[in-house]
Image: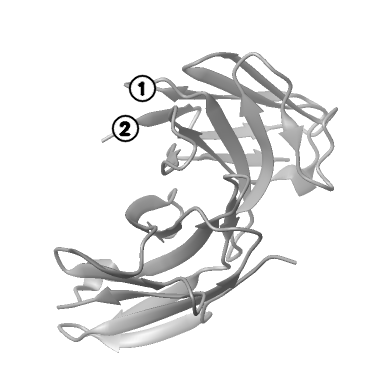
Amino acid sequence: GQNIDQPTEMTATEGAIVQINCTYQTSGFNGLFWYQQHAGEAPTFLSYNVLDGLEEKGRFSSFLSRSKGYSYLLLKELQMKDSASYLCAVMDSNYQLIWGAGTKLIIKP
Amino acid sequence: GAVVSQHPSWVICKSGTSVKIECRSLDFQATTMFWYRQFPKQSLMLMATSNEGSKATYEQGVEKDKFLINHASLTLSTLTVTSAHPEDSSFYICSARGLAEASEQYFGPGTRLTVT
């Protein structure tokens, strides 16, 4: 079966760095997405990785290792507004998105 | 970036009535649109995938006669919840994907449905 695993909840301190991991097992691979979702709102796109390596976009970076079925989202200089759920999703061979359950990130002052 | 709108943003209806939710891609053509449902503190659940001009593909466990999906144009898809019941109360979110299959999905702002 297809499976996406990510931690349920993480806590970090304002100004610090946090890494949210995601491991996956899917039928084929056409890329991995990270989305941010604030409570009561729809997800917003953060990043897309299809090749191995690190993609940096401002305070956020995303890493992919296809051989290990592993990705992480790195958030630097954390701000209170970064408190949200972070969803990992993998696009399978049929171009369908398989969603993880999301990681709730709590930022403390 | 691409913009997807949803209407209404919230709706309260009585049990047994039907509710229609519209999803529009405002600045791009969406050959494929997706409908999700999300219960509180849970992850997104894909309900169905719709391609313009063809019948929607429903996920297992989703009643196609209860959740009617129409994707009549490249910019509009509608979801109609028929004979709504309180257990249908949820956050319904649509997303749209452009012409390239491997492109990201752009999400609408969601519709919060409360059935009394």
Viewer-closest of A4 and A44: A4
Marker count (numbered):
2
Q: Which label belongs to residue B71?
A: none
Q: Residue at horizontal 16%, vertical 69%?
A: A59
Instruction: Tell me which chain the residue with mark 1 is part of.
Output: B
Q: Residue at horizontal 56%, vertical 66%?
A: A100
Q: Residue at horizontal 80%, vertical 34%?
A: B15
Q: Position of residue B5 (x, y in %)?
A: 41, 28
Q: Residue at horizontal 43%, vertical 50%?
A: A41
Viewer-closest of A8 and A95: A95
Residue wearing tag 1: B28
Instruction: Tell me which chain the residue with mark 2 is part of.
Output: B
Label 1 neighbour load within 10 Å: few <14, some 14-19, many 20+: some
Q: In the orientation shown, which residue stands out farthest toward the front?
A: A67
In the rendered image, the quadrant that contains the N terminus of chain B is top left
Q: Position of residue B26 (x, y in %)?
A: 36, 21
Q: Are marks 2 and 1 on the same chain?
A: yes
Residue wearing tag 2: B2
Q: Position of residue A8 (x, y in %)?
A: 53, 79
Identity, as a three-letter code, of the amino acid under mark 1: Phe
Identity, as a three-letter code, of the amino acid under mark 2: Ala
For numbered disc 2, what is the local secondary structure? loop
